[in-house]
Amino acid sequence: MLEKMLYREDRRSHAQNCRRDLPDNHRMTFKRSYFFWFAAALVVALSLMVWLRRGLAVDMTQVTQGPMVQSVVTNGRIGSVARTEVMSQSTARIEHVLVREGDTVQASQVLAQLHDDEASANLQAARAAVAEAQARLRQLASVQLPVAEQQLAQARAAAVLAEQELARTQELLKQGFVSPARLDEAQRQAQSARAAELAASAQTQGSQAGGAEVAAAQARLAQALANATAAATRLDNLSLRAPAAATVIQRAVDPGDTAQPGKVLLTLVSGTETRIETSVDEKNLQFIRLGQRARASADAYPDQPFDATLTTIAPAVDALRGTVDLKLRVDPAPVFLRPDMTVSVEIITAQVANALMLGSDALRRDANGQTYVLVARDGRAQRANVKLGLQGVGTTQIVSGVAAGEQVILPTTSAAEGERVRAKHADQPRGNAPMVPGLTQ
């Protein structure tokens, strides 16, 4: 009985102890949960602060410093000072072609011979007409003039006799020894004698130097000489000759072909000067000046560049293409250059030994046209107005506004002035190569 009472008392004591301990367990669980959520909030707050301090991730490029060359790049062809297309002035069969491509010819050398039988006959006829006209002049001087002078002398003598006979007849008529009819006859003979004298005088004057017949004969001779010259020219035109020392670069005909006016038979290039013929976009006119140096290379020999000098700028712009034609002198010319060879040309328009350079895509413009950039300074985007200098493809010289080594924010990210920023990844520095590509294609 006593044992049962003790057992009950122990169970009652245990139950009371359990009831006293239960609130303490609940309080410990609440305290642990509160600490966990407080720590999590603190971590989130710290992370947010760190993220905000890092700023917006942006693309950046660096301002570099070094030599910069501004150039205009274009393509052209090798030309010669004189390019001649040999053509015939008349239609004729080609008898002989005396040259081939690559031959060097001298001035007046016959290149091709056309059929010339008819032209030769015409020249012979013209020369015969010249000989006839010359003989007529000699006849006037050696035969007709002396005869005319003799006839004039006879006519004058006859006129004197007729006048004397008229005077005697008039005297005899007064004395009544002759009839009036005899006087009329004497007067008629005197008038005929005077007329014959005048005719002989005119004939003599016409046969003398400066006279009408001599002038006519000289005119006929001049006409015959002109006809002979024209015939000789037509004959000579059938022998196609080189206008100057040159090289044959194209032969388009063979013996037996028919030459026609306007049809190119041979093409020649001449002159000791080699030049490049090219064109640039008209927008580059502001950079082009006579005398500028250029670097060129033939597409067939890209590893053998050569120098050239700008010598000619066309006075007008091609309205259809919007380009300006240029000519550059190559001196000395490499031996491998050939007429019409394609070349690449870089014309040096300006150069700076120690320039600040920035990628052109980093530049911005405001509503007033002011050029500026956003520079990452002390972790924030700061506006910096810049002054530009030389411009190349993808690279621009910065005269003032930024310093070498500064990081410039590219417009590809929407960073605002004053905003905290950080580099997403920096571009490779631009413009530090010794040569900057040109302004054209």
Image (tube, helix red, strand yellow):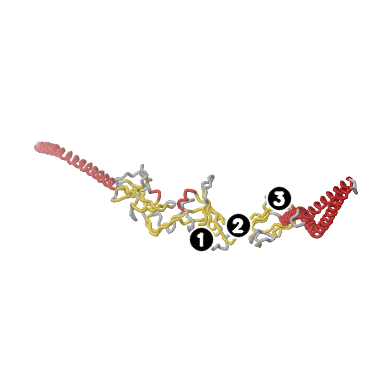
Residue at screen point 36% across, 53% down: 399
Q: Earlier in the sequence, mark 2 or mark 1?
A: 2
Q: Is residue 77 above or below residue 17?
A: below
Residue 124: give x, y in percent of width and height: 78, 56
Q: Nearer the viewer, mark 2 or mark 1?
A: 2
Q: Which residue is mark 3?
A: 260
Q: Earlier in the sequence, mark 3 or mark 2?
A: 2
Q: Which residue is mark 2?
A: 82
Which amino acid type is shown beneath numbered disc 1? Asp
Residue 59: give x, y in percent of width and height: 36, 48
CA gap, disc 3 and disc 1: 42 Å
- Give the crowd class for mark 3: few <14, some 14-19, many >=20 residues within 10 Å: some
Judged from the image, the secondary structure of the residue bearing numbered disc 2 is strand
Judged from the image, the secondary structure of the residue bearing numbered disc 3 is loop
- Give the crowd class for mark 1: few <14, some 14-19, many >=20 residues within 10 Å: some
Query: Left or right of 94: which side holds 430?
Result: left
Residue 182: give x, y in percent of width and height: 89, 47
Residue 208 vs residue 118, the one in the foreground? 208
